Amino acid sequence: MTTGSDLPAGWRLINQRACSWYESPSHAAGASLLSRIAGSADIGQLPDVDIRARGVRVRMAPDAAAVRAVTAAADDLGLAADPTALAELGYVIEATDPAALEPFWQTVLDYRRAPGSSRVGSAASGETRLIDPLRRDPTVSFRRLDEPRPANDRLHLDVGRLPEAVLSTRQAIDQQPRGPYGVLLTDAEGNEVDLCPGDALSPDTEDWQTMFSALACYPTPSSEVTTGLVTAVTQLADQAGLSLLIDVRPEAVVIDSAKDQWEGPEGADPAFVELAARVQGAARAAGVTADPGLSRFLQLGIAGRDITRLRSFWSGVLGYVCDPRPPVTDIYDPRRLNPVIFFQDLDPTEEDRARQRNRLHVSLAVPPDRVPSLMASAVEAGGRIVENLNDQGRCTLADPEGNEIRVTGS
């Protein structure tokens, strides 16, 4: 069995997968690495490769020969690994009856149970994990709660999906949406999600859906088709001078603008729409057809009394960047690998809500050597250490208002 110490320099085990982040000068450099990976005799199925304008992340089974082959390809291209960029966010939902919640969240998110994950409430562990089939969005785990926490949580999720998927989800869970925007749904224990319908980007870009981000998703039949499409898309993005998130999977390629990056002052940015049309043309030339049903957006909302202080804590601990646009409260991963977090005001009269420990928590998987520095960052940012199991490679941190992060050194 491969362990973290068996991996080449720059690689780490995160959630049982070998992971590396390589700094790169362009989207096209990431496509060059993908082409080398696809052509290697030591690598079977394509790994998960996430290409950004200034870097590329590779995640794969911890097979020593395959990892060495990726490392050699990156070295040949002059790409330098930076393991400090490696972290994966997830969400944990605590419930008195986890089994009653799993079907709701599986339907709302269009997730599936993780391989090897136990049934919620089983005698074996009482925990299960739901995952995005394309491994782009955060894992959701369920844990048993001994005593009910009836007040509304201070954390909730925003999810974007196709309009028809939103409608079918409401029918499947037998709920009518409510809330100030008419999109709020709740599970059996009151955990909230705003399930928001997307829309077409423009009349001439039918492959693209907007749901906070603009996305186009293309199932691909082979690694040759995948690499050809990705090479074309990266060249188009570099020529346009616009950043794209290009997430490559063995079965599909997902192209994403990142949240709000497709927008201009008066709707869709014409420059982005032009790039989207060219990407769509490249997909047609590659012989692939979009599957809009694969599109999904996910972000986390935190309600608090001192948003400035909360933004400072979460951006400091996670290495996120504060969105400078007034009055936007978002913070985001500068590499656009983990989900956006936004903040909203907590009603000062909701004392019970402010005091209650949340049912929804953030989980963070990092290399073990980062756990001590995260604890120090949390305290420096005004938070506290709720549980210190650093000798076991994990801890629980809380922000200044008690919202928790459960850190695991994978």
Image (spheres, rainbow, N blue to C red):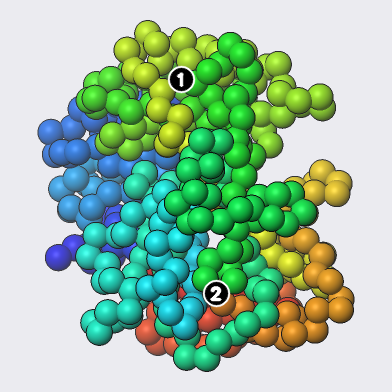
Amino acid type assigned to the residue bearing label 2 in the image = Glu
Residue plotted at (86% across, 76% down): 348
In the image, taking residue 149 as reference, residue 23 lies left or right, namely left
> Which residue is identified by label 2?
189
At mark 2, the secondary structure is loop
Determine the residue positioned at 59% across, 49% down.
Answer: 195
Q: In this rendering, would 37 be left or right of 208?
A: left
Residue 273 rendering spot, x and y as whole percentages: 63, 17
Where residue 276 sits, quadrant-wise, is top right
Q: In terms of image quadrants, where is residue 62? A: bottom left
Asked whether the residues under the numbered discs 2 and 1 touch, taking CB atoms below 8 Å apart as contact, a structural biologist would say no
Which is closer to the viewer, label 2 or label 1?
2
Q: Which residue has dot 1 on it?
A: 233
In the drawing, does residue 5 fall left or right of residue 257? Answer: left
CA separation, marks 2 and 1? 44 Å
Three-letter code, disc 1: Val
